[in-house]
Each structure stands twice: as C-alpha cells, then as structure tokens.
Image (cartoon, rainbow, N blue to C red):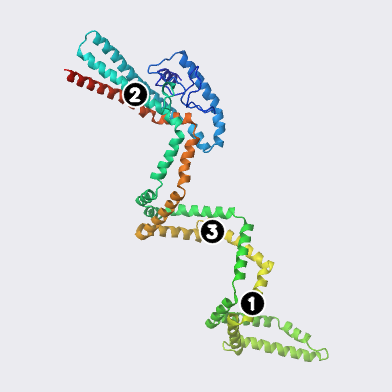
Amino acid sequence: MATRQDGERTNGMNGDQPHPSPGHGPRPGDGDGDGDRRPGRGTADDGAPGGDTGTGAGAARGAGEAGAASVAPAAASAAPSAPGGVAARAMAAFSAADEEKQRGVRRMKTIALGLLLFVAVVYALAEWAAHRGAGAWAGYVSAAAEAGMVGALADWFAVTALFRRPLGLPIPHTAIIPTKKDQLGVSLGEFVGENFLSEDVVRGRLRAVGIGGRLGAWLAVPDHADRVTAELAAALRGALTVLRDSDVQAVVGEAITRRAGAQEIAPGIGRMLDRVVADGGHKRVVDLVVTRAHDWLVLHGDSVMGAVQGGAPGWTPRFVDRKVGERVYKELLRFVTEMRDMPAHPARGALDRFLTDFAADLQSDTETRARVERLKTEVLGRGEVQDLIASAWTAVRSMIVSAAEDERSELRLRVRASLLSLGARMAQDARLRDKVDGWVEGAAVYVVTTYRKEITSLITDTVASWDAEHTTRKIEANIGRDLQFIRINGTVVGSLAGLLIHTVSRMLGA
C-alpha cells in the first residue's frame, strides 16, 4: 500500500485512477449519467508535471475511489445480461500479473517524471548561471534542458491522451481508448476480417502448414492411433447412449416397412431361386428334409399307422385296417428312404422342375407376383413382425456398445488398423496428402467466408461489452511501461535537438 500511495502521490502524470474533479460538474465526454465512469474528469495523474500532492488531490482521489466502489457492484450485476458478459467480467478482473505490470508502469512513470524534473532543475541552474555571466556553455545547457522539457511535456500529453483527458480538460481527441473503445473494436474486427479471414490468406497458411502430411505422420504412430480409436469409441458410446431406443426403433421400423412396401420382392425372389436351383444349392435342403423325414418316420411308425387306421371306414374289419396302415407306412418309409439315398430319384427331378417353374412365375406371372405382394403386406402388418424389426435395434445397439467398450474387439482392432494404414498412406502418397489438404482448405475457406461477419462480431461485441474504465486500466497495465519510454526518449531527443538548434543558431549568428 505504501508503494501505491507513493506512486500516486508523485505528480499529476504518474497516477492511474481517474476521479471527479472537486467542485466541477460533468464535462463533455465525461459520460452520460448511466453509471459508467468515463475518463474525462480530472485526476491526480492529470495534473501538471510536478503538480500538487496536497489535500485537494487527496480528497479528489478519495472521491474517485468511493465512486469506483459504488459503481463496481452495479457493473458486476449488469455484466451477465450484457453481450459478452463473461468476457466483460474477465476483462474487469485485475489479476496478480496485471497488478505486477501496473507496478512496473508506476516505476517507469516515476523515472520519466524524474528525468523531467532533472532537466527542469538543469534548466533553472543554467539560466541562473547565464545571468551570473558563467559563459557560453550555460546557453548551450539551457537550450538543451529547455528543449528536453518541451519534449517531455509533449510526449506526456500524447501518452496521457491515450488513456484519459490531460489535466481533466475536455480537449478534443483525447481519452482515445475509453471514448473510442467501440470504434476501435469495430476497426479491429474489420481488420481481422479483411487481413486474416480472406480466402487467399487461409489457403496460403493451411497450405504452408501441410495438414495432410502432419496428420498422416501423426496417425502412423501406434499410440496416436490408439488414442483416436479410444476417442471414437467414446463418442460412439455417447451417441448411442443419448439416442432413445423407442425413437430409433420407430424410425428403423418405419424405414424398413416403407422400403419393403415400396419395393416389389417377387422378381428378386424369383431370380435368386432360379440361380439357387441352377447351382444345385437347394439339394442340401432337400437332403436335410428327407433325412429328417426318414428319421421321424422310423421313430413315429405307430403314429403313422394309427392315423391311417383312424381314417378307415367304420364297417371295415380291424385287421384289415391294421394291414392297410402297415402297408402305407412301409411304402412311405421306402419312398423317403429311396429319395434320401438316390440323388437321381424321380421325385427329386420333379421338385427341381417345380422350383424352376415357380422361379419363372415369380419373375413373369402377374398373378403369382400379386399373390406374393399380398402375402408380403400381410406379413409386414403383423405385430409380431413389427416387434421383431424394432427389437433388432436393441440387439444391434448392445452389440456395438459392447464392441466399442472392448479394446480387443474386432471393431476397435479394425478401426485402429484402418487409422494406421491411413496414416502410412498419407505420409507416403503425395496425391492423397494433396487431396486431404484440399478438403481442409475448402472447409476452412467455406467457414471463414460464410461466417466472416459472425466471427468478427465476436471481436466487436466483446470489446463493446467491456467496461471503459477497466479496459483502459488493463491496456495501460500491459503497454504503459513501454509507453513511458516514449516520454524518456522524448526528453533525451528533445534535449539533443535543442542543443543542435542552439549550436546551429550560434554558428549562423557568428
């Protein structure tokens, strides 16, 4: 606190806090009464070099600090509702680093002020010596010191005018940062849009970066491929978790039903059946059926004979019914056995001809095709089929989630292998790299050209949401130290220029 008070007490060019000048009403540019304390009011910093440090300045400073304390809560409460409220709060916050920079600014102000006071003392002593007849050297020193004071004062005015009104006077084109903050934000946004978000700049920069080559080299590293695979798996799990099963089931069911209803299936089934019969693929099915039929007859002979006897007329003798049943069973078993054991059995040939004719009817016979379509519609309309279609999503989702969670699953292993292969190809194949670079450049150019206004409005709106006083303090804390070198250089250069001018004048006068 002692350091801050000492720095504030030094002189009118060395402080940081604007405050109302005692006994004065609002001046032009002081603000419009909305609670925003704008520079343009007198400050202890704005006094003349070597200005008063007495009670008047202290009272003014106290009033300013009290005003800041009363305004701060209102500004903090209003910030969230304003555009860019988060950015405004961040801008208003003065971090420890900012405080350290502010102390550096005060030190440089003290040095610049000390140099001004030094040349002022030198000027006074030189003038005194000249009046005492000290010789020509006193004139040279006096001219140099006088020009140094002029340079120091001019540069003090220039630096101060950036952040506040010097001496609190409503001088035009002063307090540039707080009064022109919004215009500076608009200009900055336009500058960024024209010079950074143009198509040529974006393409040139991305082409120089070589994203395709870098991405390929990065993906070719197994650890990086593992990382991308894990991230993709997490994203897939998250997406499947967010989706509601009922919604997906309804969409899948409706899509399958609509697709199946719109597509005639009979010709496709006929072509498939024709190829199956031509390739002999149905013979395995026939073998399976006749084998199972033979085995069933062997195990259920009594059932077959009982069925035959049960269908006999009531007036036939029982032994006749039994003999007929045994005969039917034996003939049926012989027929199935022969059909099973004889690939060239006539029944097999008849079945081949039937399937061939049926495949042709499915493709060309209008009545057969219509009957298949009616059957399809009836099947799809059954609740059991719709439930089966809907339940398919649940099974698929569970399968995908399980595969995504298992690091050794076929899904993740294939994705990892694909990423490694892609990375190796991109690292070696110049055409593929150029293609990837073209995609990236095209996407980036589309974004910056289509949404340039929205991107630059982020800058302008954010700057507009900043509080003028805090913005001024923040900017001064970050660049004020370098600006004080302008004052120092102005003092030195002014002194040298004054010395040179005085020397030339003496030479010409001689």
**C-alpha span from label 1 to label 2:** 99 Å
Q: Nearer the viewer, residue 92 or 186?
A: 186
Residue bearing mark 3: 403
Q: Sequence order check: which comes first, mark 1 or mark 2?
A: 2
Q: Which element is circle 3 on?
A: helix
Q: Which mark is residue 154?
A: 2
Give the amino acid at mark 3.
Answer: Ala
Q: Is residue 127 left or right of residue 454?
A: left
Q: Sequence order check: which comes first, mark 1 or mark 3?
A: 1
Give the amino acid at mark 1.
Answer: Val
Q: Is residue 220 visible?
A: no
Q: Quadrant of residue 431?
A: bottom left
Q: Nearer the viewer, residue 469 or 409?
A: 469
Look at discs 2 and 3 and give the one toward the viewer: 2
Q: Quadrant of residue 347?
A: bottom right
Q: Dot 2 surroundings within 10 Å: few (below 14), some, or many (20 or more)?
A: some
In contact (CB < 8 Å): disc 1 and disc 2? no
